[in-house]
């Protein structure tokens, strides 16, 4: 009886670890997809030089 209780506890621990790993993998996949698809609604212009990424006057 004791061994069955210990087995159940070990199984529960394994399930908790597996759930944590799956959540971590899911978060990593979500981040990768957002990075590849451009998760932002407007791209950042923080690393661009002056005048790059601004409005373009095409009326001339």
Image (cartoon, helix red, strand yellow):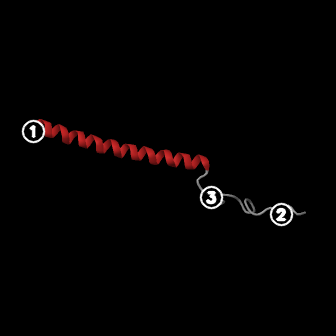
Q: Which residue is mark 3?
A: 41
In the picture, measured across the screen, residue 49 lies left or right of residue 23, that is right
Front-most of residues 52 and 5: 5
Q: Quadrant of residue 13?
A: top left
Q: Quadrant of the C terminus?
A: bottom right
Q: Which residue is mark 2?
A: 57
Residue 9 picture quarter: top left
| Proximity of marks 2 and 1: CB atoms separated by less than 8 Å | no
Image point 80% across, 61% down: which residue? Answer: 56
| Residue picked out by circle 1 | 2
Q: Where's the N terminus, which quadrant?
A: top left
Point out the residue furthest to the right here: 60
Q: Relative to residue 36, is residue 27 drawn left or right?
A: left
Q: Position of residue 8 (x, y in %)?
A: 19, 40
Q: Pick the residue in front: 56 or 11.
A: 11
- In three-dimensional space, the C-alpha distance between marks 2 and 1, rounded to whole angstroms, equals 79 Å
């Amino acid at each position: 009886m004791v061994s069955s209780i210990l087995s159940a506890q070990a199984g529960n621990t394994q399930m908790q670890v597996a759930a944590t790993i799956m959540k971590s993998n899911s978060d990593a996949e979500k981040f990768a997809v957002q990075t590849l698809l451009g998760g932002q609604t407007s791209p950042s212009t923080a690393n661009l030089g002056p005048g790059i990424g601004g409005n373009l006057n095409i009326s001339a």
